[in-house]
Amino acid sequence: MRAIRAGIATLVFALCGCAKPIQYWVKSNTDITTTAADLSGCRLAANAGGQRVFSAGELESPCMVAKGYHLSRTPPAQN
């Protein structure tokens, strides 16, 4: 029984180590409300005429970078 518990604990810690860190889209002099609106616009752009052209993930990054954002582990300002 102890071996099973130890194995489960090892698996849990291993999986936690593989988790992606939280990242935020940030842009200087831009607050969280503007960032959310820009991100929403990029995600909506993934649909064209009601048909999905790209997944949100495929379009989100290039769209946000084109708007001047970059990914950071620090959340944007909440002005």
Image (tube, rainbow, N blue to C red):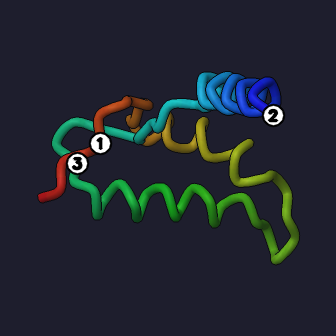
CA gap, disc 3 and disc 1: 11 Å
Residue at 16%, 43% in the rendered image: 29
Could you tell me residue 4's position as x and y percent? 81, 31
- Considering the numbered disc 2 on the image, is that residue within a helix, a strand or a loop? loop
Q: Which of the pair 11/49 is nearer the observer? A: 11
Label disc, if present, on residue 33 of the rendered structure: none
Q: Which of label 3 and label 1 is nearer to you?
A: 1
- Dot 3: few (<14), some (14–19), or many (≥20) neighbours within 10 Å? some
| Amino acid at dot 2 | Met
Label disc, if present, on residue 75 of the rendered structure: 1
Question: Can you tell which quarter of the image residue 50 is in?
Answer: bottom right
Q: Which residue carries the number 3 mark?
A: 30
Could you tell me residue 71's position as x and y percent? 44, 31
Image quadrant occupied by the N terminus: top right
Does 2 sit left or right of 23 as displayed?
Answer: right
CA gap, disc 2 and disc 1: 43 Å
Q: Residue 42, relative to residue 24: is it above or below?
A: below
Residue at 69%, 29% in the rendered image: 15
First in sequence: mark 2 or mark 3? 2
Question: Can you tell which quarter of the image residue 52 is in?
Answer: bottom right
Q: Which residue carries the number 2 mark?
A: 1
Question: Can you tell which quarter of the image residue 38 is in?
Answer: bottom left
- Considering the numbered disc 3 on the image, is that residue within a helix, a strand or a loop? loop
Residue at 81%, 52% in the rendered image: 54
Q: Which of the pair 32/20 is nearer the observer? A: 20
